[in-house]
Amino acid sequence: NGLRILAGLPGIVMGAGGLAHPAGADAANPVKLPGAAKSPYSTTETQTPFESVTTYNNFYEFGSQKEDPSRNAQNFRTSPWTVSVEGEAAKPRKYTIEEILKFAPLEERVYRLRCVEGLSIVVPWIGYSLHHILKAAEPTPKARFVAFQSFYDPKQMPWGSSTGVRFPYVEGLRLDEAMHPLAIVCVGMYGATLPPQDGAPVRIVVPWKYGFKSIKSIVRIRLVQNQPPTAWNIWDPNEYGFYSNVNPAVDHPRWSQATERRLGEFLRRKTLMFNGYGEVANLYAGMDLRKHF
Ligand code: MTE
């Protein structure tokens, strides 16, 4: 029972909803994750309400409409769960979700997330920098990229097959991007574990890139030599590049990226370069970001 295991971890308190539900329904009943440290990387902008963030989602395994994931993912089984860290690493290892939750001190990271479709949200994620797990794996000199893979089970996710997206959903980062402290392993939001529609039990969040790079429900992190394939680039390489940094100056073929609408707001606001996370600019020094979109 995933709930009991979580409850056994220090600092983790059972939510009332969690206690009432049997094994298997754990993801749909978030467990509180109190005591996450405040982070200097957090924005003080108004947070998007939990209710909006968890009912307007992109998670194509559970359907292509924004309301589909919150409706269809409620019975998603996220326990037991493992994440393997493998590939070009001296110390590859498979972690249980319980180990992932304890791997480094949990922090609250209030980040802007900018979807390529022009919508944005501000979310108090809970997690820690991805570099903790990558460094523990001891990447070999050959490791230049990191490839991520989501869980995929057509039995639990029958809605995915009609979306045109190739599953399992895959994503990737250059190793130096993945090592940037802003990139996180995310295990919770709004003070509790992730709801299924938001990528339970563990996802990646990369706040300076379009939302589709923030891959949900991951089971594999692979250190690799060559640039790995990514789900939306496979879908249409003309529309979605590997880098996908938020960039108001480079439009998507079907829509402008100059402005965005914050979920719950009426007026559009200007989109900021790197989604306002200018500290990552040095990762792209000398690169033509029109070519490497
Ligand atoms: N991860 C998986 N496995 N499958 C998906 O369809 N959608 C991506 C990303 N991660 C997606 C995914 C897209 S397009 C976006 S915008 C964000 O998740 C949305 O995250 P949210 O629903 O938590 O806001």
Image (cartoon, grey):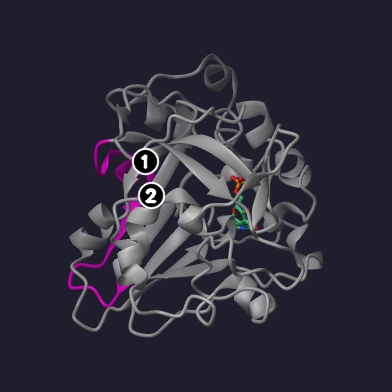
Above or below 272: residue 173: below
Q: What secondary structure is marked by label 2?
A: strand
- The disc placed on residue 185 is 2
Circle 2: residue type: Val
* Number of numbered discs overlaid on the protein picture: 2
Q: Position of residue 266 (x, y in %)?
A: 75, 34
Residue plotted at (36% across, 22% down): 34
Visible residue check, residue 14? yes
Q: Position of residue 236 (x, y in %)?
A: 69, 78
The segment highlighted magenta reads 86-105
Q: Position of residue 1 (x, y in %)?
A: 47, 33
Which label's residue is closer to the chain start, 2 or 1?
Answer: 1
Above or below 92: residue 121: above
- Answer with left or right where residue 101 lies relative to residue 69: left
Mark 2 is surrounded, within 10 Å at the Cα level, by few (under 14), some (14 to 19) or many (20 or more) other residues, namely many
Residue plotted at (30% across, 44% down): 99
- Answer with left or right where residue 272 lies relative to residue 138: right
Residue plotted at (52% across, 57% down): 215
Question: Residue 204: within the magenta?
Answer: no
Q: Is mark 1 within 8 Å of ligand 1?
A: no
- The disc placed on residue 127 is 1
Mark 1 is surrounded, within 10 Å at the Cα level, by few (under 14), some (14 to 19) or many (20 or more) other residues, namely many
Asked if the residues shown at circle 2 and circle 1 are in contact, with their CB atoms under 8 angstroms apart, the answer is yes
Q: Quadrant of ligand 1?
A: bottom right
Residue plotted at (42% across, 35% down): 43
